[in-house]
Image: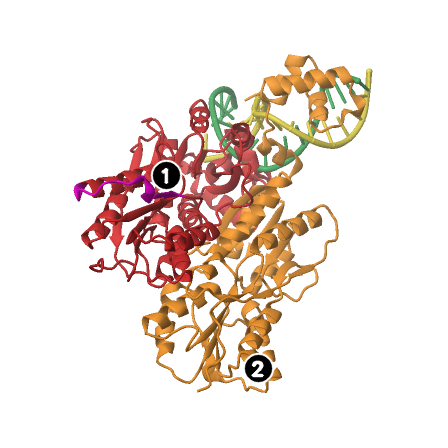
Chain colours: A orange, B red, C yellow, D green
Amino acid sequence: MATIKDIARAVGVSPTTVSNVIHGNTGRVSMNTVRRINEAIKTMRYVPNMSARALVSSSSRIIGVINHLVPMESGGFFQDPFHGALLAGIETALHKRNYYLMVRTIRTIPELLSLLASWNLDGLILTGIFPHEFYQSLLEQPCPFLLIDSYIDNPKVLQVRLQDREGGYLATRHLLEAGHRDILFCSPKIFERGVVSERFEGYRAALDEFKVPVRAEYIYEREIGIPTATALGRELAKRGDFTAIFATADILAAGLISGLHDAGRRVPDEISIVGFDDLNIAQLTSPHLTTVHQDVVEKGMTAVDMLLSAMKGGTPPDIVTFPVSLMKRQSVARRSPS
Amino acid sequence: MATIKDIARAVGVSPTTVSNVIHGNTGRVSMNTVRRINEAIKTMRYVPNMSARALVSSSSRIIGVINHLVPMESGGFFQDPFHGALLAGIETALHKRNYYLMVRTIRTIPELLSLLASWNLDGLILTGIFPHEFYQSLLEQPCPFLLIDSYIDNPKVLQVRLQDREGGYLATRHLLEAGHRDILFCSPKIFERGVVSERFEGYRAALDEFKVPVRAEYIYEREIGIPTATALGRELAKRGDFTAIFATADILAAGLISGLHDAGRRVPDEISIVGFDDLNIAQLTSPHLTTVHQDVVEKGMTAVDMLLSAMKGGTPPDIVTFPVSLMKRQSVARRSPS
DNA sequence: TTGTAAGCGTTATCAG
DNA sequence: CTGATAACGCTTACAA
């Protein structure tokens, strides 16, 4: 591999000059040498050694994307299409600005901090649910970071989120407007303050508006996953006291439909369902899933923009909240007058 | 950040000794100093600077996972669950062996080579379809690499593949055994030699075995994607001259089912379908998709094992071919005697 | 059993 | 306009 020294020797100048040309500090270098150096760079296929750069500048141009892995859980990394889309957005944006992407799952805080120090990461994007201690630890160190889909009440923390409450509201209102009154709320565990609890607040708000009481027996918290979702669908099929479901994730909704079908229930004729996310699977279920739309790829790209801007000392908005909208498809029907 | 020098100073030894202890070359160091050094490392939270290591050892412990992006295409990175699962497997395996994962999309060969040189990547895993020139260029450089799901006839090239032909055969035979004779083959573009062409060979072999001719009008090559798949489903619904479909990808199959349903056709009563991959969406369609199963996560992990083994000078098998099996679910029915 | 010193490729400071 | 020189943190002969 050709190094700066090689180029310098070939052209007959000093490494410093080559370095200057590479960085566009071409003001103090004669047009002629610039040309010759650039030529040599091309013909000798010079490529900067990022390790050396990182060492001397203590900045690596690497952004880490971190996923929290609960120790128990198996290899369930970004299995679901949601994380795929997010990563796609992040990679695209980073690539465009000449940054590199390191992907890692993390279990513990020390693990995270080592990663940071080891690689001189320039920035960090966290996706998924982390215990609060993580944010504390991150705040105590200099590397800028950004959370996707977290609800941390700290104006210093960069965050990209969604109108989760609005989404929950839209979904539920849509069901209410279709005449439904007995509407289940299906979600993963409701964390103290987070995406799910926000969506639940939206659910509650819509019910309130229609003077429908929130009933504890209508709330189902289950782990997300195809098997659990279909199982829940079959379980619910036995209940006859509800006509609609709001599921806070498309995978969940799709699984429910599948389970309900297995048990011989018809969607939406007997039971209406609204999902959340508008992943591509929403268009694969039959009936096609009415769901709350969000632009995941765009979310990833914005996250990068914000983080890089903060890294450059800019003051981007601390929190960007993405809009949601209701995608009406086929999984909701008017309640049949029973 | 504490450096080796800091530790050395604190303990009162030389940097060399510290380095030796870190690397477990503890044979020539007194038990006592070892203990004191390790203590200092803990209390001072020493973490090795990977950039420095990479610089001096010209090896980074970074493995690149590369996706080819056709210039035209938009941000369609690892959107589909397939790549997600693959990445999950790769990350898990790398993490376990203390390697780091850099994810990047690549458009051109120079771009790939620069990436390699810039970071001193220790190894490369390529997923997706690359033009042949890519392999040529990679062979001419020292960094070991591995292809997932490619068919390159070069024993020097590490590859992880699937029994694609067998899969195509199993799927098609299953349909034939159910009495079907008019079986469509739906796939993305058939490349000269590749995953799809292999699956097609399996399709052909099964038909041959049952003395059923392969008919050109039964072959559909379309881009993979939800919209095109559902559109194709609607289009096919108009044809009355077939009773079964073998789709070489679950997303395709799911889209077809969806499109067929839209057009009022019933699966599997009127039309049977077999997919390929056994992604989780296979259990979300209704009817649940009969499909050719493969273990994508395991594939990713094995890819890492092979690559690392080759990096260490071992001679792993050049090609590992993963088995497939038929997952019988609900999308295939006996041909109704018409 | 431990230490010295050189060097990896780059950048930054300062001097010519 | 251009060039020495030191420094980033680490490893590795080689010395002691």
Residue ID for mark 1: B149
What number is the disc on residue B47? none
Q: Nearer the viewer, residue B37 or B71?
A: B71
Question: Element under label 1?
Answer: loop
Q: Alpha-carbon distance for marks 2 and 1?
A: 51 Å
Q: Mark 2: few, some, or many residues within 10 Å (few <14, many ≥20)?
A: many
In the image, A171 versus B88, the foreground residue is: A171
Chain at tag 1: B
Give the image quarter of residue A171.
bottom right
Q: Measuring 44% from the left and 82% from the top, which residue is drawn there? A: A242
Determine the secondary structure under disc 2.
helix
**Depth check: B5 or B291 in front?**
B291
Q: Quadrant of residue A79?
A: bottom left
- Quadrant location of the C terminus of chain B in the rendered image: bottom left
Residue lying at 54% horizontally and 41% vertically, measured from the top left: B73
- Tell me which chain the residue with mark 2 is part of: A
Residue A198 image-quadrant placement: bottom right
User: What's drawn in magenta, residue-wise?
Assistant: B209-221
Q: Position of residue A73 (x, y in %)?
A: 40, 60
Q: Neighbour class for label 1 at 10 Å: few (<14), some, many (≥20)?
A: many
Q: Is residue A231 above or below residue B208?
A: below
- Give the residue type at disc 1: Asp
Q: Residue at label 2? A: A207
The image quadrant where one finds the N terminus of chain B is: top right
Picture coordinates of residue C13, whole percent (x, y): 78, 30
Q: Position of residue D13 (x, y in %)?
A: 47, 22
Q: Position of residue A313 (x, y in %)?
A: 74, 48
| Position of A26 relative to B272 (above/below) | above
Front residue of this view, candidates B181 and B36 = B181
